[in-house]
Amino acid sequence: MTIKLAINGFGRIGRNIVRALYESGRQNDIQIVAINELADPKGVAHLLKYDTSHGRFAFDVSHQAPYLNVAGDSIQLFSEADPSLLPWQALDVDVVLECTGVFHSRQDAQKHLNAGAKKVLFSQPADADVDATIVYGINEEELASSHTIVSNGSCTTNCIVPVIKVLDDAFGIESGAITTIHASMNDQQVIDAYHSDLRRTRAASQSIIPVDTKLARGIERILPKFHSRFEAIAVRVPTINVTAMDLSVTLNQDVDLVKVNEVLSKAASGRLEGILSYTEEPLVSVDFNHDPHSCIIDGTQTRVSHKRLVKLLVWCDNEWGFANRMLDTAVAMLAAK
């Protein structure tokens, strides 16, 4: 059975979902039937075809109202501010991928359901009353057929939670602290301009900028045992894609560097293959651009202090990896029993 998806909001994640679908060759199993985006359709087609981070799209893209044509497939375009007015029932939409970044509540998602969609998947952390928050590879088995409103978490929870789970399963974790070193985002300024967050009034290309993060709360939502046991801070750096995460954890048993890396490497080639990757090559951030994994461990940067304090460097393409997980989670939502 072909799954029918609609995308609401065609920004960085929305466009990368379309690219990921076609580049992975899954379009026989997953069909995007509609995109709702308030921007000009010519711009929609242009930005899908040409991308500064990910290069030129390998598939033909054109626009002929009211359709966006991708590799011979016709995707209907809408420009509707009110999701409840979208024709999801007529299009038999299985899952709406809610990618505007504006909506995050159950009430927001209900508008898509009222319009006829069967399920909704947020591309960002949502309010606590959604049916589930999923980090694919860790807890998608918790999905039930009755779950209609689901969050895919954030790119950073998808990056760090698998690593935490592997370490906790192997050694037990007492507590931890994380620094997210995140690429610039479109809520920042090109040159100094007004913003409610005074740090984000400053030019993104000229500073390392501390920002608020709710990552610790996101970890707790996926792994409740770690309530109040993790803290996190975040900074934005002057690059346009790829994020690094500096993870420090205190373990419940003595370890050494070799043992830690061995556990992570085995997970990458075992039960978390395709989600977690492990490398010891001398790589830099740009080398992880367009990497579909949720997280990549740089084993050369692993450190162990006093046998129980472990520090790791974890990379992710915060756009491409997350876009691939959106597709994975959407499929899992419909397969849930």
Image: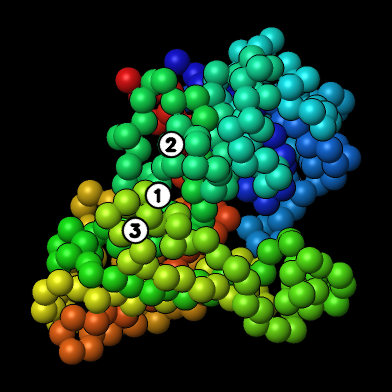
Residue kind at label 2, given as amino acid type:
Ala
* Quadrant containing the N terminus in the rendered view: top left
- Please tell me which residue is depicted at 37% across the width and 67% down the height of the picture: 230
User: Tag 3's secondary structure?
Assistant: loop
Residue at the spot of label 2: 132
Q: Is residue 280 above or below residue 34?
A: below
Secondary structure at badge 2 equals strand
Front-most of residues 153 and 67: 153
What residue is shown with label 3? 227
Pointer 1: what residue?
Answer: 221
Is 73 on the left-hand or right-hand side of 284?
A: right
141 relative to 332 in the view: left or right? left
Task: Locate the C terminus by quadrant.
Answer: top left
Q: Residue 173: horizontal and vertical position, in percent?
A: 22, 67
Residue 158 vs residue 105, the one in the foreground: 105
Which residue appears farthest toward the left when viewing the image?
254
**Closer to us: mark 2 or mark 3?**
3
Tell me the residue at 18%/89% (across/down).
Answer: 306
Amino acid residing under circle 1 = Arg
Answer whether residue 315 is visible to the viewer in this image: yes
